[in-house]
Image: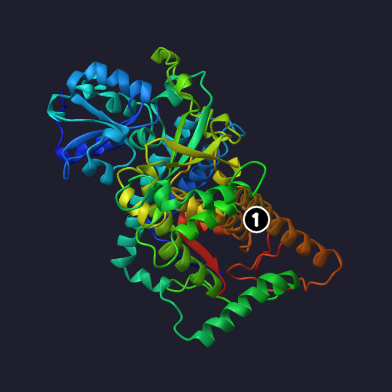
Amino acid sequence: MWPPMPRSQRVEALRHYPSAHNRWTVDFDDTGNIFIEGDNLEVLKLLQKAFGALVAAFGNNLPAKLKANAFAVQAWIAARRSVRWHGCHAGVLEAHEKWLPNAALHFEVVSCPACHAPDAQRKVDLMLIDSKDAQPRGIEQVGVPLFEASSHSGDKGIDAQALWNVLQTLNRSGIAGKTVLRGRLEASTGPQAHQLADKSKAISDCRTCHSAGSQAFQNVTISLVQPQGQRLRYGANADVLNSPISLESVGGFYAIGATRIKLLDILVILAILGGLGFAVGHLTLGWIFKYYGLNHPGGHGGGHGGQPGDGQGHKVA
Amino acid sequence: MQRLYIHPLPVRIWHLTNAIGIVLMILTGMQIRYVGLINVVSFRTAVSVHNAIGFILIANFFLWLLYYLSSDRIKVYHPELSPRKHFLGSWRQAYYYGYGIFKGDPNPFHVSIYRKFNPLQSMLYQIIMMLLLPIQFYTGILLWDVKRFSAQVDFFGGVRVIDTVHVLIFIFLVFYVLVHVYLGTLGHTRTAHFEAMLTGYENVEE
């Protein structure tokens, strides 16, 4: 049952609403169908069983119009008005908003199993999408050779510089549209994503994900979509989430505390040392001038007229 | 010594609120950014307190702005329009802080009711009040509810860009607060400027 909300919100909710299995997107304006995208065909088959005749096609059996518009789709459900899946988790956003700051954002960038399968290994998937319509980029647009070359740039996968180079190539002048990365925290594997625990055991401690070195951000993949709808993933160096070079390329994914830019930490330390050093240095210079008699004791103050290093400021007669 | 009423009550209230607020923002900001390394309060508490104080500071900023826009005291913020005069004044003041003060030279700047900032303060405070704090408030609001303001966040390049700007200004404010407090001790006594910010009255040379 649809909760009472404007259609635009429903669309938005559907676009980002993560099911336990796949992502749901919707195209009311064009085809009027709800799409389920994902790479777990087995689950889609189960969905077909659950929804009966509503799940009408898989993968290559998609109507040409759908294929042209959404190559990531592995199944589509016609007669959307009959779909009641939202009712399974009705009120879930509101429930999270009670305790989770920026709950709507968390829903967008964190899949449900990432927290509700507490024993699962987590990874960040950076998906190449079109910035305008948020549709995934496929290998037709991106080209596998470009990625394969980049993935050899380091032992730990694509690094920040290689990723930046790839995006620069994809967005070079003369190329229509803009390719960006959409980050999402997910369970590492399908089977792990299904190890859902009781909600009392779900991860709710912010430190789990927001601490530096959090396990959740040690595995990073960059994905694009194959013509059949399967995801093609390339391993990336975890540093792509912390590097200043990623400021532009991974601008849309950021976990405060965990994926912070290390260069800024150095600046924080320099600011503290600089501020304290300024005061200590100034006081010391004042003391040296006084100790060696380089000051003239009858000097005037006024305004900021005190003399550093004289213990109690410079009294003006 | 002449006793001048330099800091009116609204300015003192604003300054005190700002001082306490910014220190708390820095502390809770540190807790948020370095959770795991600093564990004084929980992450969630730090975020809630940070957000609440942020809105208090934004309201405080507009009270400050309203006061000065409706008062002739706004003259204290009028910039020196002659670049030469401003440069020379800034140089004299920097020379004084860097060398003259140690020798006991007189301060080249003399406070008056409508001219309470020396050239260095005048320039710095305009940058802080009219540029850095508004940017800090704006980026803070965007980070407070990224989803609601997603269009603006995306326009500026994403949440990482917004956060980086927010943190860069935070870093500047950390440095600024430390230096500001130290320079506050350089009155005719160590506590003269602090007392003036509480009572409103400053003792200046006649």
The residue pinned by badge 1 equals A275
Specify whether residue B60 is in view: no
Q: Where is B123 relative to B150, above or below?
A: below
Q: Where is A172 relative to B103, above or below?
A: above
Asked which secondary structure carries label 1, the reply is helix
| Relative side of A286 to B97, left or right | right
Asked whether B140 or B76 is in front, the reply is: B140
Q: Where is A66 relative to A170, above or below?
A: above
Q: Residue A13 falls in which quadrant of the image?
A: top left
- Chain of residue at mark 1: A
Q: Position of residue B97 (x, y in %)?
A: 66, 70
Q: Residue A270 falls in which quadrant of the image?
A: bottom right
| Relative side of B176 to A251, left or right | right
Report the colour scheme. Answer: rainbow
Q: Residue B189 falls in which quadrant of the image?
A: bottom right
Residue at the image position 77 percent from the left and 64 percent from the top: A285
